[in-house]
Image: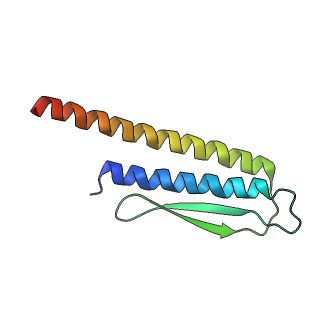
């Protein structure tokens, strides 16, 4: 079983990576011939998240990129909250023991 911080850290890295790919797509919105990339995230069988980038065949769709930025931000916030709660639980446990 994977530890919460390890799973959360991999998810934070994956959402950060997804956000950077979205930013790259937005930066190249008006670049002739640029094809938007996308990030696929999947569960790691040992716990955590694996993110991989794929080159698309379509040009940049600003509405799709804006939606991806919101999803990435919410996913990042949720995993950051999980890390905070895990930290608080560990502190509470150490206060009980100590």
State left or right for residue 84 relative to residue 72. left
Among the 4 quarters of the image, the one containing residue 90: top left
Q: How is the image coloured?
A: rainbow
State left or right for residue 38 relative to residue 10. right
In front of the other: 39 or 12: 12
Residue 5, image x and y in percent? Answer: 34, 49
Measuring 67% from the left and 49% from the top, which residue is drawn there? 68
Residue 9, image x and y in percent? Answer: 41, 52
Among the 4 quarters of the image, the one containing residue 2: bottom left
Residue 97, image x and y in percent? Answer: 10, 33
Seen in the picture, residue 63 relative to 92 is either above or below; the reply is: below
Q: How many marks?
A: 0
Measuring 52% from the left and 44% from the top, which residue is drawn there? 76
Q: Which quadrant of the rendered structure holds the C terminus?
A: top left
Seen in the picture, residue 86 relative to 47 is either above or below; the reply is: above
Residue 1, image x and y in percent? Answer: 26, 57
Measuring 61% from the left and 61% from the top, which residue is drawn there? 39
State left or right for residue 1 relative to residue 19. left
């Amino acid at each position: 079983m994977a530890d919460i911080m390890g799973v959360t850290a991999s998810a934070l890295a994956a959402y950060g990576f997804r956000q950077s790919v979205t930013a790259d797509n937005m930066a190249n919105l008006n670049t002739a011939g640029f094809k938007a990339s996308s990030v696929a995230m999947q569960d790691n069988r040992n716990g955590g998240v694996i993110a991989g980038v794929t080159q698309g065949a379509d040009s940049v769709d600003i509405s799709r990129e804006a939606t991806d930025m919101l999803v990435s931000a919410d996913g990042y916030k949720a995993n950051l909250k999980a890390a905070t709660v895990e930290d608080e639980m560990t502190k509470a446990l150490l206060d009980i023991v100590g």
